[in-house]
Amino acid sequence: MKKLLLCMLVATSFVACKNEETKKAEDAVKDKDTGTWTSLDSKTVKVRQLLEAYVKNDTSVIYEIMADTVKVREQFANNQENGKTKVDPGGRSGFAQGEQSHHLLFTDISLTTDNMRTFVWDNGGGIITGYWGMWSGTGRFTKNKITVPVHIYYRWKDDKIISIYRMFDPVTLKEEIAASQKK
């Protein structure tokens, strides 16, 4: 509203204001982050299979769909260095071992798998499958029944996952690890 009043007060600005509005409309049309998303594509199906295999403590799907050099980043507190989230060591095999370790700490692990989408950017910006769900389990040592939100982004190159960004609150995981260390 203030902008409109300013344009009306300065007679010579009328054309400039009109041009600025037109330019903003053109910029909106040229959104560099434009693309498509779907939940029924082969990549979303593969991620669902990966998560369902994880619940069963089956790492075979990891070796089928992830690059050996996959970069895994766990985005939680104190896992950053110089403003960037650290990459977990070990690539694909390190990730598989980490997933198996959850079953040493928890029983009755389950994940919701009803909220996943694969995004494809029109500008060649990549293909990412996003997962938003709930992880549940019972601590083997604390006996605590827990449920935490988990958000995971899988970046694809061709038919292989090349990087993973996983976000969750690690408090209950750290508590279970601490309880497992007590004698």
Image (spheres, helix red, strand yellow):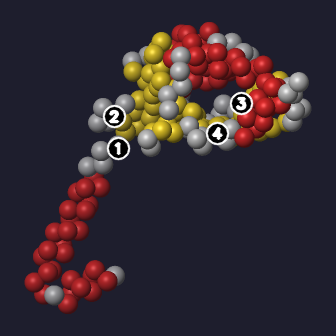
Q: Do tag 2 and tag 4 residues touch (Cβ < 8 Å)?
A: no
Q: Report the Cα–Cα distance between label 2 and label 4.
A: 25 Å
| Residue 7 drawn above or below residue 140 | below
The three-letter code of the residue at mark 3 reads Leu
Nearer the N terminus, badge 3 or badge 2? Answer: 3
Q: Do tag 2 and tag 1 residues touch (Cβ < 8 Å)?
A: yes
Residue 44 shows in the view: yes
The three-letter code of the residue at mark 1 reads Asp
Residue at screen point 78% across, 32% down: 178
Residue at screen point 25% across, 56% down: 27
- Location of mark 4 (residue): 168
- Location of mark 2 (residue): 125
The three-letter code of the residue at mark 4 reads Phe
Q: Is residue 38 left or right of residue 33?
A: right
- Location of mark 1 (residue): 33
Q: Do tag 1 and tag 4 residues touch (Cβ < 8 Å)?
A: no
The quadrant of the picture occupied by the N terminus is: bottom left
Q: Nearer the viewer, mark 1 or mark 4?
A: 4
Residue 156: percent from the left, percent from the top? 43, 24
Q: Quadrant of residue 108?
A: top right
Nearer the N terminus, badge 1 or badge 4? Answer: 1
Q: Report the Cα–Cα distance between label 2 and label 1.
A: 8 Å
The three-letter code of the residue at mark 2 reads Gly
Residue at screen point 64% across, 39% down: 168
